[in-house]
Image (cartoon, rainbow, N blue to C red):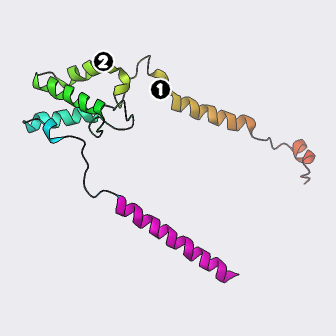
Amino acid sequence: MTAIVTGFRNWIMMIMIFAGMMMLASYPLYSVQAILPEEQMADPLDESRARDLAAELRCLVCQNQTVDDSDADFAITIRSIIRDQISTGKSDDDILDFLRQRYGDYILFNPPLNRMTFILWLAPIILLIGGIMLIIITRPKNNPQSMKERGHDR
């Protein structure tokens, strides 16, 4: 019986090692960028500024990617808007305000705390407190009478 268990453990270990090797082999060793060469600005400082702004914005198509990382058409359009506004001399705050007015606070990866996003910021705290209260309320009481009823005499 121990030979079967040992063989099974070895088999599982080999599968786990193989899966790990496959994951490592599929991991890109280089940084994949969604920015197309024709999108880049001539001035490296302006390009860096545009990349920093795009990294603060959420792609509304992908939703869990920044505009800088996404290759969706929406992200390409937003990057173009950012670069156009930088070339006209707009400040970072002006560009972010323009995009917030056009697409709402959801375009920001870190939306500001206001009456529209208040629930978004408080939801984790409310859920945590609610979960703790639920555990406390539903936990069985360990009083002597209930223990006798369950057959736990001392």
Specify few, some or many for label 2: CA neighbours under 10 Å numbering under 14, 14-19, or 20 or more.
few
Quarter containing the N terminus: bottom right
**Residue furthest toward the left?**
42
Residue, x 62% and y 31% (percent of image)? 130
> Looking at the picture, how far across and down is residue 105, in whole percent?
36, 22
Q: Which residue is mark 2?
A: 102
| In front of the other: 129 or 71 | 71
Task: Please name the amino acid that badge 1 sits on.
Answer: Leu
Using a 10 Å C-alpha cutoff, classify the residue at mark 1 as few (fewer than 14 neighbours), some (14 to 19) or many (20 or more).
few
Q: Which residue is mark 1?
A: 120
Q: Secondary structure at mark 1?
A: helix
Residue 146's x, y, as percent? 88, 42
Is the magenta region chiefly helix, strand or loop? helix
Work out whether 105 lies above or below 29.
above
Q: Is residue 141 left or right of residue 127?
A: right
CA distance separating discs 1 and 2: 20 Å
User: Is-magenta flag for residue 15?
Assistant: yes
Taking 118 as reference, is 130 above or below it? below
Q: Position of residue 76 (x, y in %)?
A: 24, 32
Which residue is located at x 66 percent, y 33 percent? Answer: 133
Q: Amino acid at mark 2?
A: Arg
Q: How many marks?
A: 2
Identify the magenta region.
Answer: 1-26
Q: Does the rendering let one see residue 112?
A: no
Residue drawn at x 37%, y 62% is 24
Query: Is residue 2 visible in this depiction of the protein?
Result: yes
Residue 71 rendering spot, x and y as whole percentages:
28, 39
Which label lies toward us, 1 or 2?
2
Secondary element under disc 2, as helix, strand or loop, is helix
* Left or right: 72, with 63 as reference point: left
